[in-house]
């Protein structure tokens, strides 16, 4: 079972990745950003399946994803 500590560590890592320069010679920023967003959503899906008390919106906000469109 996943715990709050798991959620916090993964969210901090994913949020930290968003602060790094992400464009590469092979991939533009939009492509890399979309991949990071999809990875964040995939973690949220796994965590939701492993803990009934998981708050998906709170996790996504903690990851820095969709902070403008998510309720607080």
Image: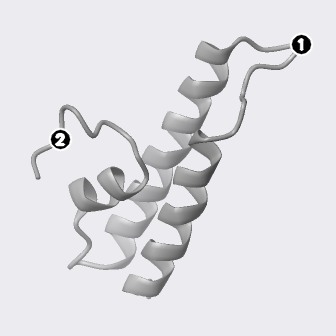
On residue 25, which mark appears?
Answer: 1
Vertical comparison of 29 with 47: above or below: above
Spot occupied by residue 25 in the image (x, y as percentages of width and height): 89, 13
Report, in whole angstroms, how far the alpha carbon at label 2 lies from the one at label 1. Answer: 32 Å
Vertical comparison of 8 with 41: above or below: below
**Residue sitting at 44 percent across and 73 percent down?**
7
Which color mode does the image show? one colour
**Quarter of the image holding residue 65?**
top left
**Quarter of the image holding residue 32?**
top right
Q: Nearer the viewer, residue 72 or 51?
A: 72
Spot occupied by residue 63 in the image (x, y as percentages of width and height): 43, 53
Total count of labels: 2
Q: Mark 2 points at which residue?
A: 70
Q: Are marks 2 and 1 in contact (CB under 8 Å)?
A: no
**Residue sitting at 34 percent across and 51 percent down?**
60
**In the picture provided, is 71 more to the left or to the right than 38?**
left
**Residue sitting at 43 percent across and 45 percent down?**
41
**Residue sitting at 49 percent across and 47 percent down?**
40
Neighbours of disc 1 within 10 Å: few (<14), some (14-19), many (20+): few
**In the picture provided, is 6 more to the left or to the right than 55?**
right
Spot occupied by residue 10 in the image (x, y as percentages of width and height): 54, 67
Q: Is mark 2 on a helix, strand or loop?
A: loop
Q: What element carries label 1?
A: loop
Residue furthest left in the image: 71
Vertical comparison of 62 with 27: above or below: below
């Amino acid at each position: 079972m996943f715990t709050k500590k798991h959620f916090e560590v993964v969210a901090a890592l994913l949020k930290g990745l968003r602060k790094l320069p992400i464009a590469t010679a092979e991939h533009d920023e939009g492509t890399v950003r979309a991949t990071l967003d999809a990875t964040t959503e995939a973690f949220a899906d796994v965590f939701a399946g492993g803990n009934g008390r998981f708050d998906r919106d709170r996790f996504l906000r903690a990851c820095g994803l969709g902070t403008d469109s998510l309720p607080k």
